[in-house]
Amino acid sequence: MRILTLLSILTALGAKYESPNFAVHAPTAEIASRVAEAAEESRRTIAVEWLGKELVAWDSLCEVHVNPGGPRPDGATTYRARYGAGSGLRIDLAGPMERILDSVLPHEITHAVLASHFKNPLPRWADEGAATLAEAETQRRRQSLIVRELVNGRRRIPLRQLLSMRDYPHLPHDTMTVYCVGYSLSDYLVQSGGKPRYVEFLEAADQGDWDRCLRLFYGFDSVESLESEWVEWLDDSQPAAKRGRWL
C-alpha cells in the first residue's frame, strides 16, 4: 500500500500479542491476537505461493502496529536490507478492520516475505504489483480500471524506465502509475508463468538486463515487445486468448 506519511498514535494502554513471527500492537487484545493469527496464515500461504515453500522462522519478530477504524485502508512495511531474515521488519496497518484483514495485511505481508527472500529492495513496480495481487478482488478491480486511463494518458511512464525504478516518484500521479501499472504488469506475467517464475525472473533481472531475462523467462524479444503485447492484453475483452506465447 502507499507509504504512510503519518499514522494516528495508538493508545499507550493498548494490547500486545506475540506469535512465532509477529509482535502485534493494537488497541485491544482481541484485535492483536486476530491480526497475529491472520499474519501467520498469510505468511505461510504467500511464501508457498511465491517461493514454493514456507519460510523458516524469522531471526526477530516483525513488529506490527494496528490502527483500526480509520476512514480508509492504508499500510506500510519497512525493513533493513541485507540483514538476517526478518531483521528490522515493521508493518503498520490502518483503516477498517475488514479492509485490514482482507487487503492491507496480505499486501504488507507479501512485501515482508519478498523482502525476507531477496534481502534487497525490489523495483517498485514488481514489489507493489506482487503485493496488490494479494488484495481482495474488489481492490484489484479498482486498480484494473485505473490502469487503462494511466496507460493511455500523456504522463505515461515508458516501461523500460519503469522496470528499473527502485524509488517512488516524487509526483503523486507518477506514484499511482507505479502502483497500478505494477499490479497490471505483475498480473499479466503471473498469469503467464506463475508466481515462482516471476520470482526467478526478478532474481535474474537484478543486474538490469531486462531484455535477456524477458527472452529467457517469457519469450519476449525486448522490453518494448512486452510493452506492446501487455497493452494489447489490457484492451482485449478475452485476455486468455493471448496467453499462448509463453514458454
Image (tube, rainbow, N blue to C red):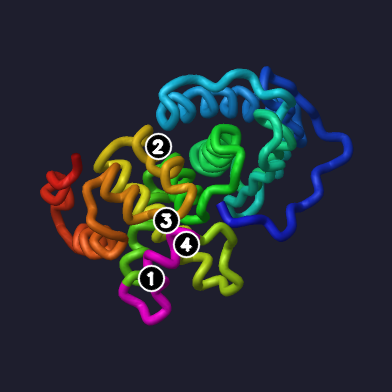
Q: Position of residue 210 (x, y in %)?
A: 38, 54
Residue 148 included in the magenta stretch of the image:
no
Pointer 3 with pointer 2, Cβ within 8 A: no
For mark 4, what is the residue?
178
Q: Is residue 236 above or below residue 38?
A: below
Kind of residue indicated by mark 4: Val
Q: First in sequence: mark 3 or mark 2?
A: 3
Q: Is residue 164 above or below residue 130?
A: below
For mark 3, what is the residue?
182
Q: Secondary structure at mark 1?
A: loop
Front disc: 1 or 3: 1
Q: Secondary structure at mark 3?
A: helix
Q: First in sequence: mark 2 or mark 4?
A: 4
Kind of residue indicated by mark 1: Pro
Residue found 23% across the figure and 64% down from its top? 228
Q: Position of residue 173 (x, y in %)?
A: 50, 72
For mark 2, what is the residue?
200
Front disc: 1 or 4: 1
Q: Is residue 80 above or below residue 229?
A: above
Q: CA distance from mark 1 to mark 3?
A: 12 Å
Q: CA distance from mark 1 to mark 4?
A: 11 Å
